[in-house]
Structure formats: structure tokens, C-alpha cells
Image: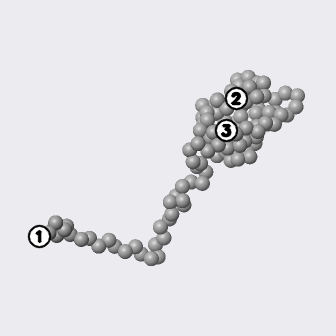
Amino acid sequence: MSEHEDFDEFDEPEEEKDEQIPSIQEKIPQSKRPKGSRITLFFRSTIGPGEKLEKLTVDPDMAVKELAATLGEIFGLDPQDFHLSVSGRTMDSDDVLSNYDLEDGLEVLIIPVSTAG
């Protein structure tokens, strides 16, 4: 008996021609970006005598509070005095940017913290 006779050969079933197998690209959500890719956002401050607009390129995995600290320095504001708002949603400072479906060129508002109770 040869060394190859110990194994039974198995015929793999042929795939049905009508069955379509999705490609790997179709399975990857379009909103997910490769690790390390950055996005460019516009930040509009509504605080103060006039609106100011700044363009900034950020990492989607950045914490919102870290971005707020950076924007505070750029706009001369205390991060405790404002919130960031995108598409009508106020960003949670304990969250990360990638949870907000941000796209290149999107505008983020810097809005004052409400003192209304």
C-alpha cells in the first residue's frame, strides 16, 4: 500500500451556478475607513461677536474631548464652555468621532453650553 492510498478522496460539491457569492468588498461597510485614514472637517464657531470657520484634518478614532481641547486652543475658548454639534446631534465628550458617521467636508458647529435649566 502506498502512502497516498491511506486517504479517501473527497469530491467537493460544485457550487450552483445560480447562487451568487458576494465579494469581500460587498461585505465591508462603506462607512468604515481603513485604520489611520484621516478626514477633513470644517468647524464653525457660533460663540462670540462673529462666526469663525476653521478647517482641520482629524483622525476618526480621536476622542471628542481631545478634539474639543484642540478647538478650544484654536478658537480661544474654554472646552467646558461649548459643545460640538454635527448634523443636529450634540457630540458626547466621552465618545469618539467615528461614532458620528463623519465624512470629508462636513461642517461641525461649536455651540455654547446652555445655561437654561
Q: Amino acid at mark 1?
A: Met
Regarding mark 3 in the picture, which secondary structure is present there? Answer: strand
Q: Residues within 10 Å of mark 1 (few under 14, many from 20)?
A: few
Looking at the image, residue 14 sits to the left or right of residue 95; the answer is left
Q: Pinpoint residue 45: horizontal percent, then vertical percent.
A: 80, 33
Q: Which residue is mark 2?
A: 70
| Picture quarter with the C terminus | top right
- Judged from this view, the residue extending furthest toward the front is 2
Judge whether residue 102 can be spotted in this image.
Answer: yes
Q: Which residue is mark 1?
A: 1
Q: Quadrant of residue 68?
A: top right
Q: Is residue 111 above or below residue 35?
A: above
Q: Pinpoint residue 76: horizontal percent, then vertical percent.
A: 78, 24
Regarding mark 1 in the picture, which secondary structure is present there? Answer: loop
Looking at the image, residue 92 sits to the left or right of residue 52; the answer is left
Q: Which residue is mark 3?
A: 58
Judge whether residue 82 can be spotted in this image.
Answer: no
Of labels 3 and 1, earlier in sequence is 1
Identity of the residue drawn at 42% across and 75% down:
16
